[in-house]
C-alpha cells in the first residue's frame, strides 16, 4: 500500500502549499519531489507516499 488515503480537498491543499513554498522559498526543481514527499508525510503521518499523488503535486 502506498501510504494514507488523501481526500481530493486535501490534495488541493497539499498542492497549493507545495507551489507556494517552492515559489516563496526558492526551492530548486531538483529538490521538489523530496520536498513534496516530506510535505505529504508530515500532513498524513504515513511513511509511504503515493507516487501518483507526488507526481501530481510537483507537476507544473
Image (cartoon, rainbow, N blue to C red):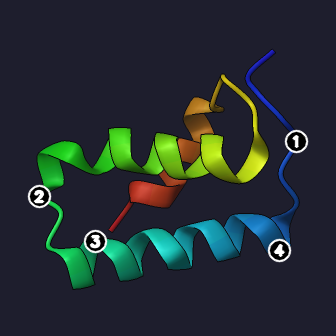
SS at badge 3: helix
Is 28 on the left or on the right of 38, as rendered? left
Earlier-in-chain disc, 3 versus 2: 3
Q: Which residue is mark 3?
A: 22
| Image quadrant in which the N terminus is located | top right
| Image quadrant in which the C terminus is located | bottom left
Q: Quadrant of residue 41?
A: top right
Which circle, 4 or 2, is nearer the viewer? 2
Is 37 on the left or on the right of 7, as rendered? left
Is 59 or 16 nearer to us in this picture?
16
Residue visible at 56% across and 31% down in the picture:
51
Residue 24: image location, x then y, percent: 24, 84
Q: Is residue 6 above or below residue 14?
A: above
Q: Which residue is mark 2?
A: 28
Q: Is residue 4 above or below residue 36?
A: above
Q: Which residue is mark 1?
A: 5
Q: Which residue is mark 4?
A: 9
As measured in the structure, the alpha-carbon distance from the residue carrying label 2 to the one carrying label 1 is: 28 Å
As measured in the structure, the alpha-carbon distance from the residue carrying label 3 to the one carrying label 2 is: 8 Å
SS at badge 4: helix
Residue visible at 39% across and 82% down in the picture:
20
Earlier-in-chain disc, 4 versus 2: 4
Q: Mark 3, residues whose alpha carbon is within 10 Å: few (<14), some, or many (≥20)?
A: some
Decide: marks 4, 2 in contact (CB < 8 A)? no
SS at badge 2: loop
Decide: marks 3, 1 in contact (CB < 8 A)? no
Q: Quadrant of residue 8?
A: bottom right
Earlier-in-chain disc, 4 versus 3: 4
Amino acid at each position: 500500500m502506498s501510504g494514507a488515503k488523501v481526500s481530493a480537498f486535501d490534495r488541493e491543499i497539499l498542492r497549493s502549499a507545495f507551489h507556494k513554498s517552492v515559489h516563496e522559498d526558492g526551492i530548486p526543481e531538483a529538490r521538489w519531489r523530496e520536498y513534496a514527499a516530506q510535505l505529504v508525510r508530515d500532513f498524513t503521518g504515513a511513511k509511504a507516499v503515493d507516487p501518483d499523488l507526488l507526481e501530481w503535486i510537483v507537476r507544473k
